[in-house]
Image (cartoon, coloured by chain):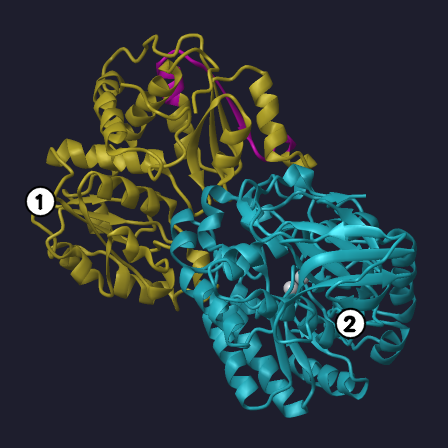
Chain colours: A cyan, B yellow
Amino acid sequence: MKLLIKNGRIFDGKSATSRISDILIEDGIIVEIENEIESTGCEIIDAKEMYVLPGLVDAHCHLREPGFEYKEDIESGTRSAAKGGFTSIACMPNTNPVLDNEAMIMYIINKAKTDGIVNVYPIGAVTKGLKGEELSEIGEIKFAGAVALSDDGRPVNNSALMKKAMQYASMFDITIISHCEDLDLVDEGLMNEGYYSSILGLKGNPAPAEEVMIARDLILAEYTKATVHIAHVSTELGVDLIRNAKRRGVNVTAETCPHYFSLTEKACEGFNTNAKVNPPLRTQKDVEAIIEGLKDGTIDIISTDHAPHHIDEKNVEFKLAANGMVGFETAFPLAITYLVKPGHLTVEELVNKMCVNPSKMLGLNKGTIEIGKSADILIFDINEQYTVDTSTFESKSKNSPFDGFKLYGQPQYTIVNGNPIVREKVLL
Amino acid sequence: MNLKSKDLLGLRDISAEEIQYILETAKTMKYIVTSNNKKTAHLQGKSIITLFYENSTRTRLSFELASKYMGASAANISASSSSVSKGETLIDTGNTINMMGSDVVIIRHPMSGAPHLLAKNIKASVINAGDGMNEHPTQALLDMFTILEKKGTIKGLKIAIIGDILHSRVARSNIWGLTKLGAEVSISGPATLIPRDIDKLGVKVYSTVQEAILDADVVMGLRIQLERQKKGLFPTIREYSRFFGIDDKRLKLAKEDALVLHPGPVNRGVELASSVIDGEQSFINEQVTNGVAIRMALLYLLTRRGTNNEVTN
Ligand SMILES: [Zn+2]
Ligand SMILES: [Zn+2]
């Protein structure tokens, strides 16, 4: 089977600039990248006036299977990912049962082979049952195929245990993804502590709750020389702490999510539970600092933290509502609209944040367009605007505060292993 | 004039004109409450339900009397006896009430925003009788009514609100209402109980009670929940009353004819000294009467809009 992509502007994730070129794919492998490829008997995609990028790689999502299939499962989750231009995704272990042992890691890998339409890589738990008490079998988990470790959803609260986790994990050359949150400082806070929490009468979750824990993990990473990845950075001081740690030579990478550069705490107005997320949406000043961190390289990665929840878990009192929003189908358009269009990042820099760097952090052989590599590709038209309609999401859940937003950058084609599974914006 | 929304969820969402109109209407209602014949037909044929997820005998009684004085049929659901304990959601409960044809649902709920959720999901008018730390608009309206009665105006007055502002829905509603009507609001209390960025609402935050009270026309104490001490929000009750309590000496800093208000029930000797509570400047008892008048006015205004269950927002 042959596929020819004609006349697209290619950012391959390797070169410094783009070029208009053709790409020939045979049996799922990229075999030729040339100015004019003549070929017969193959499917042709005309990518004229469009960008051709490596398929997006998500370092942080929740697929909810096993245990919470009413919110999402591997099938619906990977369909949602494909619709959003993602060809490889790493899923968090806070399922039921938790992905804290070899068998569960194998389960996800095998289930993804049958049900998934994009590449799925499981992340294993740092501690057994995410309880923060004992280390999980980190070595076995790694050799079973886990690409990173995280207790995401919860911090590893005990600092001594976190230090041991870092020491032990670095033996196996696997990164710990840290969900930074000092639970005592959160103190049942429901949204960012600030003007809006004050006027809405909702208990505040102060920025220091995140920052104190970021600082702790940076200190421990420096001390243990382990590799740490800070998940979903949302505050100005958080960015500053990471910038400083990088200067000191700490092995740290960091991610933020689209909602932290496109929304502020104001989105919670009217007790909008779709804007309830953890860490909470912050202030305009934080948004600007996040963008600055993306620009200067402090923040390496944009991940989705795709967190689907059933409508019954959101259509309740703000205090009772679950944290999180669905992310796959708006992540790339939000990045294009809020980062590339206003000139904060170039498309090439975005390719680094959403393809190259996440792939490196997870140790995957993905995130670039290269001869001999499997053909995972995203094609989009940067000038076409569309209106987000959450009811059309492929995800089982629709909990998004972006309904009705006018965005750019909706994927036209998503190609996984040479198969165009999204064609002209339609998922097959 | 009509109220714009089908609901009264807070004083944040309504205009100064609407607030004035409610206060004006309450004048007539107060006449009824204080007269010998407390029976009118304003709410004849209307069904009013109080839905209380939190105990408050005072507020509930005040609403129930207001309904009954005006001829409505009123019923009460309290959380312990309702389906809440059986896992029914707020929206389920709201729907059930809705289907039974109630015109107004008065809700008290421990979580901020609960009345807003209910209002979005049912046809009946919703009155917020206190939601979490958010708002308690009828309490603020009765405070404002009391001030208006004694001072003739709210505009230009200095009003000091002292105590646990952070957890106080009464304080929030008063801040919205009083600033809308042109009062200068000053607040003070333990720094741990002052909401972040509250000064952005145009109130002045003082670190000492003395400064906040100085030359005030109204001094409003707030109820302090004694269990906040255990959460480390202030060290002891003793220290609280020493630094933040209002006694005769502190009250003297206010204008000579300053009013003392408190949403009640007061912790005697903590927020207010007994001599202040029982003193000549205290209108705490009058507030209770005015509460019924305000609630009558609101029920009348909300049920008067359009036909029974018309949704106009
Ligand atoms: Zn997390
Ligand atoms: Zn997460």
Q: Which mark is residue A180?
A: none
Q: Residues within 10 Å of mark 2 (few under 14, many from 20)?
A: some
A252 w.r.t. B130: above or below: below
Q: Nearer the viewer, mark 1 or mark 2?
A: 2
Point out the quarter of the image occupied by ligand 2: bottom right
Given the image, on which type of amino acid does mark 2 rest?
Answer: Glu
Residue B310 in view = yes
Image spot of residue A253 (x, y percent): 63, 78
Q: Quadrant of the C terminus of chain B?
A: top left
Q: Residues within 10 Å of mark 1 (few under 14, many from 20)?
A: some
Say if the magenta span includes residue B71: yes
The residue lying at 76 percent from left, 48 percent from top is A422
B98 w.r.t. B199: above or below: above
What distance separates the C-alpha of mark 1 from that of mark 2? 83 Å
The residue lying at 87 percent from left, 70 percent from top is A101
Residue topped by disc 2: A370
Q: Nearer the viewer, residue A346 or A183?
A: A346
Q: Secondary structure at mark 2?
A: loop
Q: Is residue A246 left or right of residue B176?
A: right
Say if the magenta span includes residue A93: no
Q: Secondary structure at mark 1?
A: loop
Given the image, on which type of amino acid does mark 1 rest?
Answer: Asp
Q: Nearer the viewer, residue B294 or B243?
A: B294
Q: Nearer the viewer, residue A255 or A40?
A: A40
Farthest residue, direction left? B256
Q: Which residues are magenta?
A: B65-83
The residue lying at 62 percent from left, 54 percent from top is A49
Q: Which mark is residue B257?
A: 1
Q: Quadrant of residue A13?
A: bottom right
Q: Is residue B242 left or right of residue A388?
A: left
